[in-house]
C-alpha cells in the first residue's frame, strides 16, 4: 500500500456543479458559482466582503496594492512561512523584516514584533500556522499603538477560531488558500477577505485589472473604464463551481479532519513521549482548523532517518518550510544565520504526516504502526 502525503478529495457535488457551469456557458470569472462562494464565505465567517482570486499569493498581492506599499516600506513577516507571505509585498518594493516564531504554536512570536518596528514599518503579517490562531489580541494592540496595518495570511486557518472569533476577521484584510493541499480546495485558488468596508470598492477595482467593471455589472455606471492600478486576479467560474461543492461540505470535511487529527494525537502520545518527539500544541483559546498533523523530531538526523524509513514502507511524510531569512533571496534583505533561532531549529526537525480528508482508517492505522516502529 502506498500512502501519499495528500490526495484529491471529491466529497460532494463538485462534478455536478462543473457540468452546470459548462451548461451555463459562463466559464470566466464572477459568474453564478463565484457569487455563491462569496455569499457562503461572507455568511459563514461574518466578513463584509469575500473576493475569490486565482491564488492566495494573488490575494496577498492585492493587499499590498490596497495598502499602497512603496519601495522602502517594511513588512514584518515570520521567517517560517511560504515564500508568498513575503514575496507579495517585495513585488511592491517593500522590504521584508523576518521575525522568529513561538516554540509552542510555531506562530509569529508576538513578543518579538515590537522591537522590529521602525518608522518605515507599514504592515505586520501573522500566519496562522497549521490553522492555530496567532496571539491576535497582542498583535492588534501593537499594531494600533504603533500605527501599522495587519494582514492575516490565513492560508491554513479557514474555519479556525481565536477566542471564539473566526480566523481571517481580525486584520484589515486576510487571505485564504484553496490549493489542492488545503482543507477546502479547487486545485489552485484563493480569496481576499476585506474586513474594512472603506476598502471594498477599491478591492473590486484592483481585482478587475484596475477597472470599475463590478460597478458596471451592478448598473452603477453605464460603461466601465480604467480607474486605478490592478491586475487579473479573478478566478474562473469553472474552478468556483468545484470550490462551491467543497464549501457546501465544509462541516463534513472539518469533522473528518478533526477525527484524523485527534487519532494521530492520541495514538502517538506514548510513543512521542518515550522518543523525545514533540506533538502539536493548541492553546485553550484556539479552535484549530485541523489543517495538518506534524511532529517535531529531536534533530535533523533523526528526521531524515524517520522520513526515509516511512518512505521505504510506501508512506510519504514530508518536511515543511525552509527559513526565509537564510534563503538566497532572504540574505539579500540582510537575513543571516542566528537571526531567528527557533525558526532554524523547527525547520530542521518538523515532519508532516499524511493527512487528507479521504484518508481511510486502514491508511491511518498503517501510518501509526510505521511511526510507532521507529526509534530515535
Image: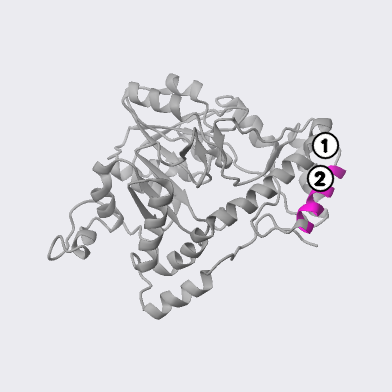
Q: Main secondary structure of the magenta part?
A: helix
Q: Residues within 10 Å of mark 1 (few under 14, many from 20)?
A: some
Mark number displayed over residue 271:
1
Residue 4 location in percent, x, y? 71, 58
Of callouts 1 and 2, which one flags the residue occurring earlier in the amino acid sequence? Answer: 1
Q: Residue at x 43, y 50 (%)?
A: 44
- Visual colour scheme: one colour
* Residue closer to the observer: 3 or 91: 3
Q: Which residues are magenta?
A: 362-373
Q: Are marks 1 and 2 in contact (CB under 8 Å)?
A: yes
Q: Is residue 40 left or right of residue 109?
A: left
Q: Can residue 181 be seen in the rendering of this structure?
A: no
Q: Residues within 10 Å of mark 2 (few under 14, many from 20)?
A: some
In the picture of the structure, the residue carrying the numbered disc 2 is: 371
Quadrant the C terminus occupies: top right
Q: Is residue 97 left or right of residue 281?
A: left
Amino acid at each position: 500500500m502506498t500512502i501519499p502525503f495528500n490526495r484529491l478529495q471529491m466529497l460532494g457535488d463538485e462534478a455536478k456543479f462543473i457540468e452546470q457551469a459548462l451548461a451555463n456557458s459562463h466559464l470566466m470569472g464572477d459568474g453564478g458559482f463565484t457569487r455563491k462562494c462569496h455569499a457562503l464565505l461572507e455568511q459563514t465567517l461574518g466578513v463584509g466582503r469575500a473576493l475569490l482570486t486565482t491564488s492566495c499569493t494573488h490575494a496577498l498581492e492585492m493587499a499590498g496594492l490596497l495598502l499602497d506599499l512603496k519601495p522602502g516600506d517594511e513588512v514584518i513577516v515570520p521567517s517560517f512561512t511560504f515564500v508568498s507571505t513575503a514575496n507579495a509585498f517585495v513585488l511592491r518594493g517593500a522590504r521584508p523584516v523576518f521575525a522568529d516564531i513561538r516554540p509552542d504554536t510555531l506562530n509569529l512570536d508576538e513578543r518579538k514584533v515590537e522591537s522590529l518596528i521602525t518608522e518605515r514599518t507599514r504592515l505586520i503579517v501573522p500566519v496562522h500556522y497549521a490553522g492555530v490562531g496567532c496571539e491576535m489580541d497582542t498583535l492588534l494592540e501593537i499594531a494600533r499603538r504603533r500605527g501599522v496595518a495587519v494582514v492575516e495570511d490565513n492560508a491554513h486557518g479557514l474555519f479556525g477560531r481565536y477566542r471564539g472569533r473566526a480566523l481571517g476577521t481580525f486584520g484589515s484584510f486576510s487571505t485564504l488558500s484553496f490549493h489542492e493541499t488545503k482543507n477546502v480546495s479547487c486545485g489552485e485558488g484563493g480569496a481576499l477577505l476585506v474586513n474594512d468596508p472603506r476598502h471594498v470598492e477599491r478591492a473590486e477595482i484592483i481585482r478587475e485589472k484596475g477597472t470599475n467593471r463590478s460597478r458596471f455589472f451592478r448598473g452603477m455606471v453605464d460603461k466601465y473604464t480604467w480607474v486605478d492600478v490592478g491586475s487579473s486576479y479573478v478566478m474562473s467560474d469553472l474552478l468556483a463551481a468545484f470550490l462551491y461543492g467543497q464549501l457546501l461540505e465544509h462541516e463534513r470535511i472539518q469533522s473528518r479532519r478533526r477525527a484524523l487529527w485527534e487519532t494521530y494525537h492520541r495514538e502517538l502520545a506514548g510513543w512521542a513521549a518515550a522518543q523525545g518527539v514533540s506533538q502539536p500544541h493548541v492553546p485553550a483559546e484556539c479552535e484549530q482548523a485541523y489543517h495538518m498533523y506534524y511532529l517535531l523530531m529531536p534533530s535533523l538526523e533523526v528526521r531524515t532517518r524517520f522520513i526515509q524509513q516511512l518512505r521505504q514502507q510506501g508512506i510519504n511524510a514530508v518536511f515543511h518550510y525552509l527559513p526565509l531569512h537564510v534563503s538566497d533571496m532572504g540574505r539579500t534583505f540582510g537575513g543571516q544565520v542566528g537571526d531567528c533561532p527557533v525558526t532554524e531549529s523547527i525547520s530542521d526537525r518538523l515532519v508532516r504526516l499524511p493527512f487528507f480528508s479521504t484518508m481511510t482508517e486502514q491508511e491511518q492505522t498503517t501510518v501509526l504502526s510505521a511511526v510507532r516502529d521507529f526509534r530515535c
